[in-house]
Image: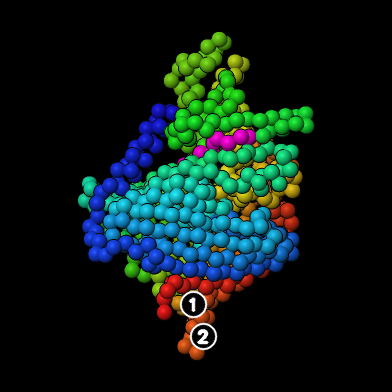
Amino acid sequence: MKKFLSTLVVLLVTSTLQAQYQEPVRRDTSRLQPLHGLEYKVEMQGSLSKGRTPLWLNANKYGLSSLETANGYVRGGIERPLSTDEGRKFGLGYGLDVAIPINYTSKAIIQQAYVEGRWLHGTLTVGAKEEPMELKNNELSSGSQTLGINARPVPQVRLALSDYWTLPFGNGWMHLKGHVAYGMVTDQNWQHDFTQQQSKFTDRMLYHSKAGYLKIGNEEVFCPWSLEMGLEMVSLFGGTSYLPDGHGGMKVSENGKGVRDFWHAFLPGGADNGETTYQNVQGDQLGSWVMRLNYDGDWHGISLYADKFFEDHSSMLQLDYDGYGEGDEWQMKKERRYLIYDFKDWMLGFEYRYKPDNWLNNIVFEYLYSKYQSGPIYHDHTKTVGDHIGGKDNFYNHYILPGYQHWGQAMGNPLYRSPIYNEDGTIFFKDNRFVAFHLGLGGHPTENFKWRFLGTWQEGLGTYEMPYTKKRHNVSLMGEATYTLQGTKMPEWMRGIDVRMGVGADFGSILRGNNYGMQLTITKRGLLGKK
């Protein structure tokens, strides 16, 4: 099984890297101008709430948000997008995005700081950059289960084939894109403050992600149908973990940081520090199988998509070996017998798109189920229990590392209740077994005005380790409208300013009580040097 997984990932990443060196038709007509095409952005935001900031005023904002009753920020940034050098063999991009917040987890936030270069199709990015979700609507979806937009960007080195590249075989019907990245999280001080160094935390934890997507479709023959399939994977590893020893002290665990450990993050393998008889792969390994079927007509578009989340190989392959011997041979593989798990723990989605300006342009509906997690049975076989059932996967949590979070926010889908909501100083996802229905609506009746609505119903069971005594429920709502100031009688400096107003509410017990709030955001974008 491990060989199958290793071969699959190697083929995926190798294909991505090979694709970067296929030369497109490009002609450089002028010298590169590093200061040409600079864009600026200035933004101010303020939120007022009764209780905490409601979920959809807080979530899916790349971690630039706060749960405090009154919060806000002033933000400024400059960026030279790679698209400035479109048509050239080589492209240069960079950006710096800084926020000064009020009542946030930091007194100053470097939200983005990166430089990136493109040679032909391949892109190398160094630094922290906001990356959008793949195969989902970034405005209306509840969020991706693996590579989401809910937490602050992780500083990393990222090699990517960012846009679909048409493979040299398949008569123009097959296209590929993907990435490989390594980085380090930046929330060490926040973990110290949040836990008071009395519960589990990790310093200088390392981060690895990779993804590959295959698209089958051909726009050249005017076929409106396309199919996108992909695999997204993340590994959290390395760093120094501090774990309560049960006697009021902390036990130190030095996690692997060597070349072999980086390799085990890339191709899942090895074992965590201290594992002997039962050895699982090193670090926190998780990911999603994703798929999206699209129809794009002249006026309308429809998509059906799926996001199958997994936390280890049992839920990744839906298969586990179950043919071990008995007695002294309890660790030996004796029979060709396998256990097939139920096909559960999905996000299933539908999206409708109406392209001309209209009051209703987009409809997104999603169903999420995460209650199975390979079942509630014991994790490994023993001398007395021969059946090997790898259950209780405990999504987003890990027994050594602080789980799939950054600065307290889930790095995937925010319906997994983020640790920042915890009041006991533990970095732990306390509600990762749930079922939810999510609705997103959006429209742009004119080029100056757009709106969106998000509504989510959720039923939570807690976790296998710490289940709720009874089911908990939650409803989260948000309405938002954005108007762009324009007009010939208006001063030039005011033209193009976006004014966005949002109102939100939470009802129920998953997020601990009812919350009501409003949020005002004013944004000005422009091109530096433009007269």
Q: Which numbered disc covers residue 491?
A: 2
Q: Is residue 390 shown in magenta?
A: no
Q: Can see residue 425?
A: yes
**Residue beneath disc 1:** 496
Residue found at x 37% / y 36%: 10
**In which quadrant of the rendered image does the C terminus lie?**
bottom left
Q: Residue furthest right?
A: 248
- Image spot of residue 26 (x, y percent): 24, 59
Q: Name which residue type carries label 1.
A: Gly
Label 1 Cα crowd, 10 Å radius (few <14 / some 14-19 / many 20+): some
Q: Name which residue type carries label 2.
A: Pro
Label 2 Cα crowd, 10 Å radius (few <14 / some 14-19 / many 20+): few
Q: Residue furthest bottom?
A: 489
**Total of numbered circles in the picture?**
2
- Image spot of residue 360 (x, y percent): 49, 71
Q: Main secondary structure of the magenta part?
A: strand
Is 399 above or below relative to 288? above
Residue found at x 32% / y 62%: 32
Q: Nearer the viewer, mark 1 or mark 2?
A: 2
Is 75 above or below relative to 491? above
- Image spot of residue 293 (x, y percent): 38, 54
From the viewer's perspective, is 520 left or right of 5?
Answer: right
